[in-house]
Amino acid sequence: MVKVHTLKLKRKMEFKDLVGLHELSGIDTSIELIQWGNWSENANVYLFVLDGITYKAVEDPADGYRSMCKELEICIDKVSYRFPPQKVVGKMKDDDKYGNNDVIQFYDFITDKLVLEIGTENYDDWYPTCVMNWYPENLFCNENK
């Protein structure tokens, strides 16, 4: 009897789950009205497509001085900016003298330049900071444009 392994996709995931080689093929940034318990407010949202799966990252703006990136969610939202798959390598950002980081950084496989970073810097500090940065100019396909 052959044992078949199936991959179960978690609806919510940690940033470290995306460490390794991937193909990035889409991104979208927006501001959405997000419900937080009994209230709602505008929040920054990033959608990005890795290996054909769409991930959603939402900023929790906390109180204007602090912000955090909630855990990633796999979603079916439509991503408006699509492009041919580009190989990227996901790495966790190292902690530094200012604090501990929970940030996934994607580097172009060929140029080794930072393309996308999402997460929370200084997550265990009094003033954590949500990080959502997209650098399309660092993709190899855009190098001479």
Image (spheres, grey):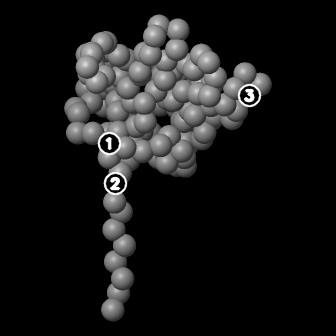
The amino acid beneath tag 3 is: Asp
**Residue 72 position (above or below residue 1):** above
> Dot 3, how many residues are within 10 Å of its Cα: few (below 14), some (14-19), or many (20+)?
few
Q: Which residue is mark 1?
A: 74
Element on which disc 3 rests: loop
Distance from disc 2 to disc 1, alpha carbons, whole Å, reads 8 Å
Gap between marks 3 and 1, in whole Å?
29 Å
Q: Quadrant of residue 38?
A: top left
Tell whether label 1 touches label 3 (CB within 8 Å).
no
> Residue under circle 2?
9
Q: Which residue is mark 3?
A: 96
User: What is the distance, in whole Å, between disc 3 and disc 2 at their CAs?
Assistant: 31 Å
Front residue of 124/135: it is 124
In the image: residue 19, left or right of residue 13:
right
Q: Position of residue 36 (x, y in %)?
A: 31, 22
42 to the left or right of 110: left
Identify residue type, mark 2: Leu
Callouts 2 and 1 close, C-beta under 8 Å: yes
Is residue 129 positioned above or below 112 on the image? above
Nearer to us in this view, 28 or 73: 73
Instruction: Check disc 2 and report its element: helix, strand or loop.
Output: loop
Residue 93 image-quadrant placement? top right
Q: Residue furthest top?
A: 64
Residue 102 in sight: yes
> What amino acid is at disc 1?
Ile
Comes first in the chain, label 2 or label 1: 2
Badge 1: residue crowd in 10 Å (few <14, some 14–19, many ≥20): some
**Mark 3 or mark 1, which has the lower sequence index?**
1
- The residue that appears at 70% across and 32% down in the rendered structure is 95
Question: Which residue is pictured at 27% across the width and 39% down the height?
Answer: 75
